[in-house]
Image (cartoon, helix red, strand yellow):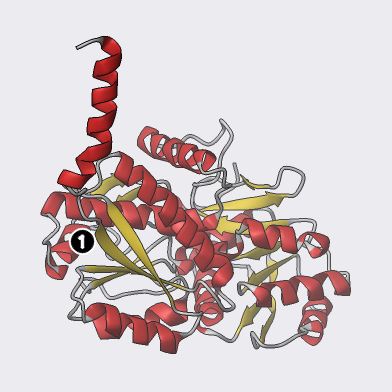
Amino acid sequence: MGRFQLSAFICAAAFLAPLGASAAEPFDIPVVLPLSGNAAFLGQGEQRALQIQEDVINQEGGIAGRPIRYVFNDDQSSPQIAVQLANQIAAKQPAVILGSAIVAMCNAMSPLLANGPVLYCFSSGIHPAAGSRTFTAFISTHDVSIALVRYYRQRGFTKLAMITSTDASGQDGALGFEEALRLPENKGVTFVAKVQFSPSDVSVAAQIEQIKAADPQAVIAWTSGSPFSTVLKGIIQSGLEVPVGTTDANMTNAQMAQYASFMPAEMLFMSSEWPEHTAELTLDPKVDARQKAMFAAYAAAKTPPDIAVAHAWDAGLLVVGAYRELGLGATPEQIRAYLAGVKGFAGINGIYDFVAQPQRGLDVMDSVVTRWVPEKKTWLIVSNPGGSLP
């Protein structure tokens, strides 16, 4: 057979092969996310993160030779719909459900799954009991609170003001900062003003005026999504010119573009070490390698990463790792036990130790303070791990 005949034969065989042997069926991993509604700014980013990761995992051979498929379910930013979806998915008896993205949805879903699938929530603001079947991504809001107060204190800011929303996320943040101020290291740091507002409020002018009258050196604004824009507008309109720190949930490219015209001069965000960093910050080589792989995957997808990748990426890798170790027939209890025993796993957020930090794997020393740099359209890490000054 000549060379050209052989080539034609190979092409024909490749074309006809699927007719005789079907490709491996995808292994589905259910995901619940707010793909619409007021939390869609975060849920859509987490969906994109998992879609990019799905391609990476499948290029590596998937799980036991089968490609994975993240199956997305939209909870519409509603705890009630999240509960409905959790019941529907649990009836199919998967071992794991990923999501949702916000405290209220995760807290609503978790009790339903106490004896069912493992729930790996993407919100840092829930605090599941050790040994339970609920796990949570990212650093605890209580730990990032410690890091931000430490950063403020070391800069000489001891008179702080706090504005929080009355929803579950805002109240969890308020509790975290109250606890942080009670630590011995923060003796002398006080809240000169603490105010709240409803997420449905269209103005917080009165609350910001109360803060301004107290003459704080820095502000903590703990809310996310459109309520965060309401707070920023109030701060700018009042003429209050102090550093403003907020939750990592607001570290999205879409929000930064949308809020550019009313962003404070110094806008700080709590984070893990996932953003690109300067040579001054030395990471564990395994974490650095994991981050470079993630950035390469996002570059190939022509998508700039934001906080959504920090919430979803490592959770996906850990669950896939569990299936690879235990097999596709793993039970919820086997998955729970596997995750509970993970120690030394390098993710983009740091080195996970679920033995030392049950259900989460990360602690305050995995957190940093970042600053939004408008001219570069990115976040710059401005603290050491744990929030101390460089």
Residue at 35 percent of width and 82 percent of height = 85
Name the residue rendered at 27%, 75% in the picture.
Answer: 129
Nearer to the camera, 251 or 19: 19
Q: Is residue 365 visible?
A: no
Quadrant location, the N terminus? top left
Tell me the quadrant of the picture where the C terminus can be found.
top right
The percent position of residue 290, horizontal first and vertical second, equals 39, 39
Considering depth in this image, is 289 or 148 the residue closer to the camera?
A: 289
* Residue appearing at x 13%, y 69% in the figure: 333
The answer to whether residue 143 shows anywhere in this view is: yes
Q: Locate residue 263 relative to residue 164 in the image: left or right.
A: right
- Residue denoted by label 1: 340
Q: x, y (%) of residue 231?
A: 73, 75
Q: Quadrant of residue 249?
A: bottom right
User: Secondary structure beneath disc 1?
Assistant: helix
Image coordinates for residue 140, horizontal then vertical, percent:
43, 65
Residue occupying image coordinates x 28% and y 19%? 7
**Amino acid type of the residue that numbered disc 1 sits on in the rendered structure:** Ala
- Report the side of 289 relative to 273 (left or right): left
Q: What is the x, y in percent for residue 311?
A: 44, 59
